[in-house]
Amino acid sequence: MSNRENGRWFRKGLRDGIPIAMGYFAVAFTLGITAKSMGLTALQSAVMSFTMLASAGEFAAITVIGADSGLIVMIVTTIVVNLRYLLMSTALSQKIDSRTGLLHRLLLSYAVTDEIFGVAVSVDGKLNPFYNYGMATVASPGWTLGTALGVIAGTILPTQVSNAMGVALYGMFLAVIIPPARKERAIAVVVIVSMLVSWLFSVLPGIQNISSGTRIILLTILIAGAAAWLRPVDENGELGGNER
Amino acid sequence: MKISIPVYLLVAALTIYAVRALPMTLIRREIKNPFLRSFLYYVPYVTLAVMTFPSILGATGSLATAAVGFAVGVVLAFFDGNLFRVAIGACVAVYIAELFL
């Protein structure tokens, strides 16, 4: 990791962090509105968003606070709702150079979010931590400010604008998963199956009551497990057989 | 006794950080097991696909405009792949659709 390389990755991170920050801002705004209804101030909401940097995780935390359910419930809920970060953090631990020091590992851990993870894990070869720092530098303020503004002025944005911003994060997800799916048939199948099963889980009676956090973990383990069994990668971490 | 909001927030922040930091700091070596390696290879695609669909259909004011955003996002991602352009393109498509639908 030369300084020049680090700088280059940091700047790339700042750039790729912009759509993340935009999407975060819109989602955080609605989070702020909910936080206010549960009695949190703008400052408390901003601190929560800056320290947790999680969407479903924060919604869950606000719910626990609103019901005053106690610290044990807070700990258990936070672990369960955010369990997917355990998987993502494990995947990232394999994406960085195995000689990466403790400080970088502790810093990287702050910004393991769905979006930053999704982008970081899709780079070719090993991941330079500065890429994540760049993304977090833009995305974290977007998330934090969005939450605070949601508390202060929940109705400031025209509906059409906030509706339009609502798809920013998903557009980004699509940009992460579709190009590799175009190159690798196994990934295309995994993406399509994942979306279909996820949709089934949202409409089937009974199953649709499973929370979205749990659904994500459950389907990730099942589908990624099945794909790993059916189409394992070779020792270079690539899929054999299919031309890239 | 009512627990204060700052205490709740501190506990939540520490818990979520532990969930993220434990694998990152404890798994210091490359995982050699072929199944685990393959599993971790597929994790991001499944996770992001499951998070995107069908949630995206409820992300705007109406199913119709959200479907437009989804379709435009898929097409743009297929031909372009630049994160910012795909995200903005999907937003603009929804904004325009909101004017008509």
Image (cartoon, rainbow, N blue to C red):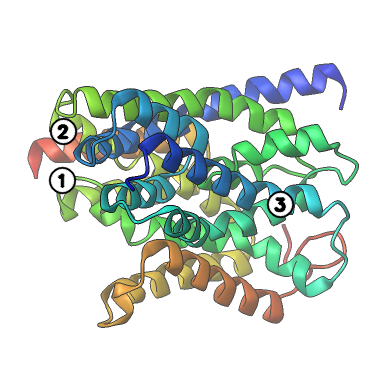
Q: Which residue lies furthest to the front in this view?
A: B1
* Chain holding disc 3: B
- Position of residue A13 relative to residue A83, above or below, is above
Given residues A235 and A111, the one toward you in this image is A111
Task: Assess disc 1: are there few (<14), some (14-19) or many (≥20) residues with their C-alpha within 10 Å of its C-alpha.
Answer: some
Nearer to us: label 2 or label 3: 3
The secondary structure type at the circle numbered 3 is: helix
Question: Is the C-beta separation of discs 2 and 1 under 8 Å?
Answer: yes
Whole-percent x and y of residue A41? 28, 27
In whole angstroms, how far apart are the C-alphas of marks 2 and 1?
A: 8 Å
Task: Say which residue label 1 marks.
Answer: B61
- Position of residue A35 relative to residue B31, above or below, is above
**Residue found at x 84% / y 17%:** A3
In whole angstroms, how far apart are the C-alphas of marks 2 and 3?
A: 41 Å
Task: Say which residue label 2 marks.
Answer: A160
Whole-percent x and y of residue A179? 56, 50
In whole angstroms, how far apart are the C-alphas of marks 3 and 1?
A: 39 Å
Residue type for callout 2? Gln
- Image quadrant for the C terminus of chain A? bottom right
Mark 3 or mark 1: name the one nearer the start of the chain.
3
Q: Is residue A32 left or right of residue B88?
A: left
Residue type for callout 1? Gly
The secondary structure type at the circle numbered 1 is: loop
Task: Assess disc 2: are there few (<14), some (14-19) or many (≥20) residues with their C-alpha within 10 Å of its C-alpha.
Answer: some
* Chain holding disc 1: B
* Chain holding disc 2: A
**Residue found at x 76% / y 50%:** A93
> On the same chain: label 3 and label 1?
yes
